[in-house]
């Protein structure tokens, strides 16, 4: 029988991608908007804490198993900033463009050799609200920050994230290639494997 799982995100791209991979396991992924789950405050100090907060909130409100992810960009020259604050680097409610501009500004004087960075993604699964042993999967994608944006695909910091293995920015990659390489793709495939093993 198909089991339902709530996804603690309303991003249609994420829902589609996760639903496709989990359909093979007879799991049906539903966005939390279908249950009117209100967003929870991301008060954690780490990606994993925030992912668990989001998943627990969705599990509590729906009574279903829940999946959530939390992701962001770590820049070495900025000691890991923007990190968990990636979506609001330029302030609460800031646009992707404002966040990206602030990042380029902060790195103006940093030479190419010191612009290493990575995207991190923590994806968690809670069988229920009080699950004491969540499945936790982590993906990391290494690159460096460009001096100027390149490409129109993706979102967030993609136009300034240079992918050395493909010699282009992540906004210049076709979406299917980005999914193969990305922090989120890595974490998601690990989660699918863990759920398949769990049965
Ligand atoms: P969240 O995990 O949905 O909270 O997103 C965190 C933030 O990290 C996003 O708003 C982006 O600023 C950034 N981010 C995470 N993943 C990516 C990515 O694949 N490309 C570009 N930016 C990303």
Image (tube, rainbow, N blue to C red):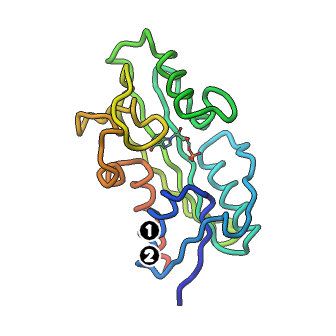
Query: In front: 41, or 187?
Result: 41
Q: Secondary structure at mark 2?
A: helix
**Counting other residues with Cα less than 10 Å from the Cα at mark 1, is it few (<14), some (14-19), or many (20 or more)?**
some
Q: Residue at x 52, y 30 (%)?
A: 97
Point out residue 120 in the picture as x, y percentages from the top left corner. Answer: 48, 43
What residue is drawn where x is 36% and y is 24%? 146
Measured Cα–Cα span from mark 1 to mark 2: 6 Å
Dot label at residue 196: 2
Q: Label 1: which residue?
A: 192
Find residue 171 and report its image quarter: top left
Q: Secondary structure at mark 1?
A: helix
Residue 104 in the image: x percent, y percent? 47, 20
Q: Name the outermost residue toward the bottom.
A: 1
The percent position of residue 196, horizontal first and vertical second, equals: 44, 75
Is 63 placed left or right of 133 in the picture?
right
Task: Indicate left or right for 39 with 184 as reference.
Answer: right
């Amino acid at each position: 029988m198909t089991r339902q799982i709530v996804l603690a995100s309303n991003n249609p791209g994420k829902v589609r991608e996760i639903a496709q991979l989990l359909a093979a396991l007879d799991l049906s992924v539903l966005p939390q908007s279908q249950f009117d789950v209100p967003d929870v405050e991301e008060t954690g100090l780490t990606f994993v804490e925030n992912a668990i907060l989001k998943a627990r909130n969705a599990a509590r409100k729906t009574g279903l198993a829940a999946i959530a992810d939390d992701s962001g960009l770590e820049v070495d020259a900025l000691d890991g900033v923007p990190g968990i604050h990636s979506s609001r680097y330029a302030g609460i409610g800031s646009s992707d463009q404002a966040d990206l501009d602030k990042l380029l500004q902060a790195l103006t004087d940093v030479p190419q050799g010191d612009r290493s960075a990575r995207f991190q993604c923590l994806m968690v699964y809670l069988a229920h609200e009080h699950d004491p042993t969540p499945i936790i999967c982590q993906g990391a994608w290494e690159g460096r920050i460009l001096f100027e944006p390149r490409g129109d695909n993706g979102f967030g910091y993609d136009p300034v994230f240079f992918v050395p293995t493909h010699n282009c920015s992540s906004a210049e990659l076709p979406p299917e290639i980005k999914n193969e390489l990305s922090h989120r793709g890595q974490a998601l495939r690990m989660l699918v494997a863990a759920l398949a093993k769990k049965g």
